[in-house]
Image: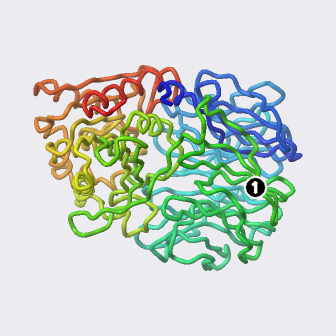
């Protein structure tokens, strides 16, 4: 049975669990109302209750460890200038009160009397570190420093913070910031690129559990001695460890590992010894959070045929139970299609992994939408995607390649598209089209968002004969103007990936789709949010103007109250049916 697009867009999810200090309730985020807000549910299960009631998206809800206070973030119109709020007893307090600055929460101190955050309050560019007393203290600047920083974790005694300094999306350092002296000590000296994430301070404050790829190709679980800075690895160098969470008493360690896009949930004891694997449904696991008594761990679980929900796992060897039950808008879950994980050969013989969904009907001749992820340091995974499920019901196949430069397949693979190698990843898209045609799929469109939008435009300009249509969502048309106009802190993060405006301007201009827009012959749809701080709306305006000047066919959707993507249900209900109609028109899929 076919369902209208609006039904699929009203499928809901729940994620981001946080336990109340007594362990009796779990707060989480859900978009039941059309935009993410904070809700809570009894830890034993039951009817959820809404706690925030805003017209803007809420992010990162966290319970205080000692009171019923809830800390959350919220921006305005997708501008990503998040402010931090404290909710207590139904009363909300704006803690940061600086709408021109970006604030990234570092959470509550162990005694619940302070919060830490990184923010651009000083100059709009550099992320300094602040600590603020509750309930009504002022932000105190504890580390004034240049660059992009986030607060990773408080120490158990509240005496120091673990702070991450980000050099790029795949290279960072951790610092131990002493709050009494203000001194910051480097914990992770290294050469080349390395990731150090998901840091947890042990109860004694003498070591960290974390995830790092410093000494290998993949991200591994490791223990770092805070005195010697020596690192001991606890998992093999074969798959990326993604999240690490240590229970408050140090008895248990929960770890997620990315295996071909799916997640393994692993458990370790406090000494780093492996415990039996828990029985968790196959899917993608994230958002790990231990209960205050360390007897349960909450997590978010999603999969290709499973919309996101919060689950809990009894420790040490109990069952996994679904805590929230998000609506599928009356669409039977059994109707959702599952993908095949495939690999196809590219121009240099390298095998490129992909997630391939095929419709029940139309067989090998089904038109295909090649859906390209953003990042580029990201990965297409078999997560629940309502838009994909609708398109499958329309008779389209959906093919999501993890072209070179993607994460999840090792550090070396991630660096295969850096700077001068950029267009090799576009060749991977062309070879995806060749592989699909070899399987009988003649009509092929390309669609993507953010960096995926750049890939759409690059594919249409470099290989115009391969594509029947293109959909560019908040994408980059001109790498030079993108780097010039994106958020100032983001330019420093993105230049190691794309190239420097000072050193590589000529190359960046040579590969930018805007300078080859006359090659675009396929119909194009462009979607953008006016308030986008990452890929400014000028990127959309440039490509639309150029294609129209050249007599090309282009449809343009601009949303005044959105940023980098479409967060609001009313806008998704407007945009995505138009995208589907556009694809139907140009791929002529059976209905």
Q: Nearer the viewer, residue 478 or 37?
A: 37
Residue 545: quadrant of the picture: top left
* Above or below for 93 versus 133: above
Q: Image height check: is 582 above or below 277? A: above
Vertical comparison of 32 with 65: above or below: above
Q: Residue 334 falls in which quadrant of the image?
A: top right
Q: Could you tell me which secondary element the residue under label 1 belongs to?
A: strand
- Whether residue 14 is visible here, answered yes or no, is yes
Q: Position of residue 364 (x, y in %)?
A: 31, 49
Q: Residue at x 44, y 56 (%)?
A: 340
Q: How many marks?
A: 1
Determine the residue positioned at 79% across, 46% down.
19
Residue closer to the observer: 249 or 399? 399
**As displayed, is residue 123 above or below residue 187?**
above
Asked where in the image residue 85 lies, by quadrant, the reply is top right
Of 545 and 192, which appears nearest the observer? 545
Quadrant in which the C terminus is drawn: top left
The answer to whether residue 458 is left or right of residue 176 is left
Disc 1: CA contacts within 10 A as few (<14), some (14-19) or many (>=20): some
Residue 547 appears left or right of 213:
left
Visible residue check, residue 199: no
* Residue located 11% across and 25% down the image: 551
Residue 366 placed where, x, y %?
Answer: 31, 42
Colour mode of the rendering: rainbow
Q: Is residue 409 left or right of residue 42?
A: left
Q: Position of residue 501 (x, y in %)?
A: 25, 49
Q: Position of residue 576 (x, y in %)?
A: 42, 27
Q: Which residue is mark 1?
A: 320
């Amino acid at each position: 049975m076919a369902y209208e697009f609006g039904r699929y867009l009203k499928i809901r999810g729940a994620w981001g669990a946080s336990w109340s200090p007594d362990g009796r309730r779990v707060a989480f985020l859900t978009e039941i109302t059309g935009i993410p807000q904070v809700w809570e549910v009894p830890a034993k299960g039951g009817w959820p209750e809404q706690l925030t009631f805003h017209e803007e998206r809420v992010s990162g809800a966290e319970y205080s460890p000692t009171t019923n206070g809830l800390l959350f973030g919220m921006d305005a119109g997708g501008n990503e200038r998040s402010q931090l709020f404290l909710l207590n007893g139904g009363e909300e307090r704006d803690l940061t009160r600086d709408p021109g600055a970006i604030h990234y929460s570092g959470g509550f101190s162990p005694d619940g009397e302070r919060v830490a955050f990184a923010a651009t309050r000083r100059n709009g560019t550099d992320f300094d570190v602040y600590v603020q007393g509750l309930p009504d203290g002022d932000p105190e600047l504890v580390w004034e420093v240049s660059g992009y920083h986030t607060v990773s974790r408080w120490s158990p005694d509240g005496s120091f913070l673990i702070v991450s300094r980000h050099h790029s999306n795949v290279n960072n350092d951790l610092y131990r910031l002493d709050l009494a002296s203000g001194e910051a000590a480097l914990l992770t000296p290294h050469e080349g690129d390395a990731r150090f994430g998901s840091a947890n301070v042990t109860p004694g404050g003498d070591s960290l559990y974390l995830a790092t790829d410093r000494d290998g190709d993949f991200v591994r679980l490791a223990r770092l001695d805070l005195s010697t800075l020596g690192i001991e690895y606890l998992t093999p160098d074969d798959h990326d460890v993604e999240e690490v969470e240590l229970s408050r008493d140090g008895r248990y360690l929960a770890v997620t590992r990315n295996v071909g896009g799916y997640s393994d949930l692993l458990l370790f004891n406090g000494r780093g010894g492996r415990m039996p694997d828990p029985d968790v449904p196959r899917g993608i696991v994230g958002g790990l959070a231990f209960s205050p008594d360390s007897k349960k761990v909450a997590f978010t679980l999603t999969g290709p045929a499973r919309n996101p929900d919060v689950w809990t796992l009894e420790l040490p060897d109990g069952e996994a139970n679904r805590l929230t039950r998000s609506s599928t808008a009356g669409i039977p879950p059994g109707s959702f299609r599952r993908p095949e994980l495939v690999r196809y050969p590219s121009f240099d013989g390298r095998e490129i992994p992909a997630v391939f969904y095929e419709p029940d009907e139309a067989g090998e001749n089904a038109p295909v939408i090649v859906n390209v992820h953003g990042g580029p340091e990201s990965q297409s995974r078999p997560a629940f995607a309502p838009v994909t499920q609708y398109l499958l019901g329309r008779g389209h196949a959906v093919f999501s390649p993890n072209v070179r430069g993607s994460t999840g397949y090792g550090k070396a693979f991630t660096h295969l598209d850096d700077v001068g190698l950029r267009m090799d990843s576009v060749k991977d898209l062309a070879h995806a089209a060749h592989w699909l045609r070899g399987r009988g799929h003649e009509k092929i469109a390309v669609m993507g968002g953010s960096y995926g939008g750049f890939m759409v435009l690059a594919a249409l300009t470099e290989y115009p004969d391969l594509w029947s249509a293109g959909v560019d969502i908040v994408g980059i048309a001109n790498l030079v103007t993108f780097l010039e106009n994106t958020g100032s802190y983001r330019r420093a993060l993105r230049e190691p990936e794309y190239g420097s405006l000072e050193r590589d301007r000529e190359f960046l201009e040579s590969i930018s789709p805007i300078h080859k827009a006359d090659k675009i012959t396929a119909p194009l749809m462009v979607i953008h949010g006016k308030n986008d701080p990452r890929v400014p709306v000028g990127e959309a305006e440039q490509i639309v103007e150029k294609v129209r000047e050249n007599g090309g066919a282009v449809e343009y959707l601009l949303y005044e109250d959105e940023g980098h993507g479409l967060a609001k249900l009313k806008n998704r209900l407007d945009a995505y049916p138009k995208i589907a109609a556009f694809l139907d028109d140009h791929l002529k899929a059976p209905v």
